[in-house]
């Protein structure tokens, strides 16, 4: 009985922490006024927020005796895929000049998103014909 | 012996990950599931090994585990810092900057892990690579000391990744 009680309280605690971080992420998304700073809000939700909610789900299933470990897999795939979408949004921002132009790279000529290949016009012509 | 091992498991790490994912998907840890997972982990890399021509040769598993714990701890700490910034710092006082990280890492896998780590740690987002892949562009949400952030990325993450992928 006590173990079940502790588990329930732990579930509630982690749910509260997780939803708190999701709330902060949403506030950040609404508050910031620049596309690049706004991008920082979802990375927070995607890590601690979702992590805590999944942890709560795991503890809950463990307490009820119906152990579930799928959450670990969700966490793993989320951590692998979240940076890719953030990277794509950042690239679109740079490409559309929606943010401050980034400084020149210290070791190479230019950033790969800003680079236009020499034969670019030919490529477009071939694609259209 | 080593050749037989290499032939059977061209990518030992992938074998391990596939076995673990299979067991987690089945949601039960039993001998049958583990054996079937290892079987899948041998067959899939074996069938797809021609699409992995330049896989990293050296990979230190133990250091990678330590590294992931450090990253998880950093995510927790940085999350609280960024939540504080979101709630207290007004937009006008926010100091977002770009920082350029010159890379010493050369393997694509290692650079991918570094970029992923930077994005997962709240407050920094890796935005772009230079055209030859020797510099990484990172956006910082709020900092008074861009060189300090750069120094932390270099010493805390990149140095460890150099040791892992060596």
Image (tube, coloured by chain):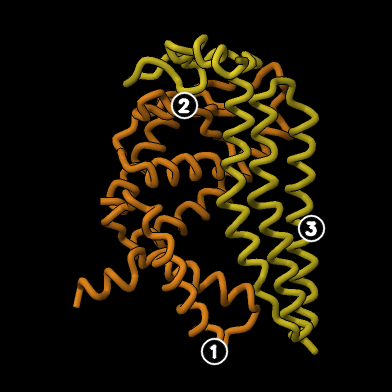
In this rendering, position of residue A27 left or right of residue B108? right
Where is A111 relative to B23, above or below?
above
**Pick the front one: A80 or A129:** A129
In the image, residue B83 lies at what x, y percent? 68, 40
Q: Which chain is orange?
A: B
In this rendering, position of residue A14 left or right of residue B7? right
Q: Residues within 10 Å of mark 3 (few under 14, many from 20)?
A: some
Tell me, yes or no, whether the two marked residues, 1 and 2, touch with CB atoms within 8 Å. Answer: no
Chain A's colour is yellow
Kindly identify which chain the residue marked by label 3 belongs to. A
Residue identified by numbered label 3: A16
Q: Residues within 10 Å of mark 2 (few under 14, many from 20)?
A: many
- Looking at the rendered structure, the secondary structure element under dot 1 is helix
Question: Quadrant of the image for the N terminus of chain A?
Answer: bottom right
Cα–Cα gap, marks 1 and 2: 47 Å
Same chain under badges 1 and 2? The reply is yes
Where is B74 relative to A51, above or below?
above
Residue identified by numbered label 1: B32
- The image's mark for residue A29 is none
Residue identified by numbered label 2: B137
Looking at the image, tell me whether mark 1 or mark 2 is earlier in sequence order.
1
Point 62% across, 66% down: residue: A72
Tell me, yes or no, whether the two marked residues, 3 and 2, touch with CB atoms within 8 Å. Answer: no
Look at discs 1 and 3 and give the one toward the viewer.
Answer: 1
In the image, residue B48 lies at what x, y percent? 43, 60
């Amino acid at each position: 009985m006590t173990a079940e009680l502790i588990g329930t309280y732990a579930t509630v605690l982690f749910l509260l922490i997780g939803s708190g971080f999701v709330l902060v992420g949403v506030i950040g998304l609404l508050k910031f006024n620049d596309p690049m700073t706004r991008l920082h809000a979802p990375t927070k939700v995607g890590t601690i927020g979702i992590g805590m909610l999944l942890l709560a789900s795991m503890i809950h299933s463990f307490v009820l005796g119906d152990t579930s470990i799928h959450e670990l897999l969700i966490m793993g795939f989320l951590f692998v895929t979240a940076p890719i979408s953030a990277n794509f949004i950042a690239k679109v921002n740079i490409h559309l000049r929606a943010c401050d132009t980034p400084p020149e790279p210290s070791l190479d000529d230019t950033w790969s998103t800003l680079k236009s290949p020499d034969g670019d016009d030919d490529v477009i012509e071939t694609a259209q014909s | 012996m080593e050749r037989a091992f290499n032939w059977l498991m061209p990518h030992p790490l992938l074998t391990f990950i596939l076995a673990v994912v299979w067991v987690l998907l089945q949601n039960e840890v039993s001998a049958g599931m583990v054996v079937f997972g290892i079987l899948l982990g041998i067959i899939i890399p074996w069938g797809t090994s021609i699409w992995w021509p330049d896989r990293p040769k050296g990979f230190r598993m133990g250091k990678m585990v330590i590294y992931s714990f450090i990253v998880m701890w950093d995510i927790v700490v940085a999350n609280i810092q960024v939540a504080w910034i979101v709630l207290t710092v007004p937009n006008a006082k926010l100091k977002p900057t770009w920082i350029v990280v010159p890379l010493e890492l050369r393997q694509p896998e290692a650079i991918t892990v570094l970029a992923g780590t930077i994005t997962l740690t709240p407050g920094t987002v890796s935005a772009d690579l230079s055209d030859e892949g020797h510099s990484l562009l990172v956006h910082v949400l709020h900092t008074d000391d861009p060189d300090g952030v750069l120094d932390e990325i270099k010493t805390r993450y990149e140095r460890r990744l150099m040791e892992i992928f060596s």
